[in-house]
Amino acid sequence: MTSARIYLALGLALFLAVILPPVLSRFKVNAPIVLVTLGLGLGLLPGFRELDLDPTSHQVAVTHITEFTVLVSLMGVGLALDRPLRLRSVESWRTWSPTWRLLGIAMPLTVGGVALLAWGPMGVAAPAALLLGGALAPTDPVLASDVQVGGPNEGEDAGEAREDSEEIDEDDEVRFALTSEAGLNDGLAFPFVHAAILLVTVGSVSEWGLRWVGWELLGKIVLGVAVGMVLGRAIARLAFRARSRDLRFAANGEPLVAIAALLATYGLAEVLGGYGFLAVFSCAMAIRSFERKHSYHHDMHAVIERLERLLTLVVLLLLGMALTNGILANLDWRGVGISLFLLLVLRPLAGLVSFLGHPHRSGPLDFDRRERIVAAFYGVRGVGSLFYLAYAGSHADFAEIRWLWSVVAFTVLVSVYLHGFTAPLAMDWQGRVREPAVERD
């Protein structure tokens, strides 16, 4: 009967996943809020309370489920971004300035802030404190749909391939900054998680510090991005320009190529030792850079979006059930304090600091005060944090692992409600300034 109840819950939730988006579009409530709340309710019902949802007992399964969910989301994010990144163009790199600032300043400040708070005043062991900082640092590409860009734009002739054009670009700088940040920082959190694992398995920093900087921090990032770019370009060239029409997937309209590209890219990057998350995002960006006005990008994004919706449903439903089935049993005042400090103080301040020196309104690519506040505040935490914690727990023995699960699960729960309820209002608030400014430009 236990498996039957799970099938029943998943079936009902899947119906909700199909029904909710058009219904919730009329209200200021998003699907993650409803799904987590549904999971919370199911976890209290007889029959569901007996389910073993302890993540420490199923760390390998949790790792793979959350891993694939994040991968699918990263592929969708890369395909959705309209703004190109041309490696040889300084101006193109400048248009990504908010992203580089959030990644290079806000993210390290977040890792360090959480780790120092946990290790110092809270008295958490150094490896666990660093793991908590690394796991909670990345913003989530899965749950942040309310503050991210939509699907890729298309040209006037949807079925016709066209040359690359600068005419297609993002029209909302805040959404672009938060989306591109979420696409990249999931991979960039890996070095810090690996450092926490090395503290447990190897010992002091002096024994592995240089190797960590050279390989974990630099080498694996470069390798992951390179693998993604090379495979993405190869797949795109085949899809759009193969001599044989049978191999020209864009002409045939075969969207499953996006899933094949995701799996192949992640697998190759991991086999070679690079960061697969970065490889998948880079692959999607490389594919998107080909024939940027072609409707095939929209077709691929649509199938990825549907798969992401299904995976998100499963993860959020199980998370909600786990929240009322003991995952918060080890939560204490320290965990609550760290979580609230991260969401309400640290991330907003780190985001604002990252924009210091960034030009104020002088063109469509610059942030005004409201846009900076929104971009700084909406660092949504979600499935990526669950993945990193499960990954670390399956590679090393952390004495505080159950406490860490309680803190991360509580943080994700608060983020779902806090950011989910306020995001529509905040985006409307900053959008009222953006529209007149763009018209003047």
Image (cartoon, rainbow, N blue to C red):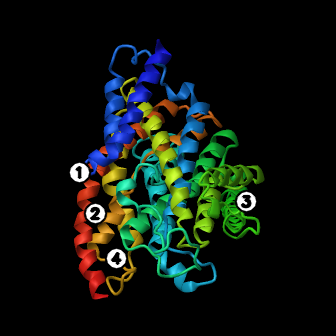
Q: Residues within 10 Å of mark 4 (few under 14, many from 20)?
A: many
Q: Report the front residue among 150 and 330.
A: 150
The disc label shown at residue 26, or none: 1
Q: CA distance from mark 1 to mark 3?
A: 43 Å
Q: Residues within 10 Å of mark 2 (few under 14, many from 20)?
A: some
Q: Is residue 39 above or below residue 438?
A: above
Q: What's the residue at 30%, 67% (across, down)?
A: 373
For mark 4, what is the residue? 367
Residue 52 x %, y % = 49, 20
For mark 2, what is the residue? 427
Q: Amino acid at mark 2?
A: Met
The disc label shown at residue 309, or none: none
Q: CA distance from mark 4 to mark 3?
A: 46 Å
For mark 3, what is the residue? 246
Answer with mark 4 or mark 3, whichever residue precedes in sequence: 3
Q: Amino acid at mark 4?
A: Phe
Quarter of the view holding residue 227:
bottom right
4 or 3: mark nearer the eye: 3
Q: CA distance from mark 2 to mark 3?
A: 44 Å
Q: What's the residue at 26%, 57% (across, down)?
A: 424
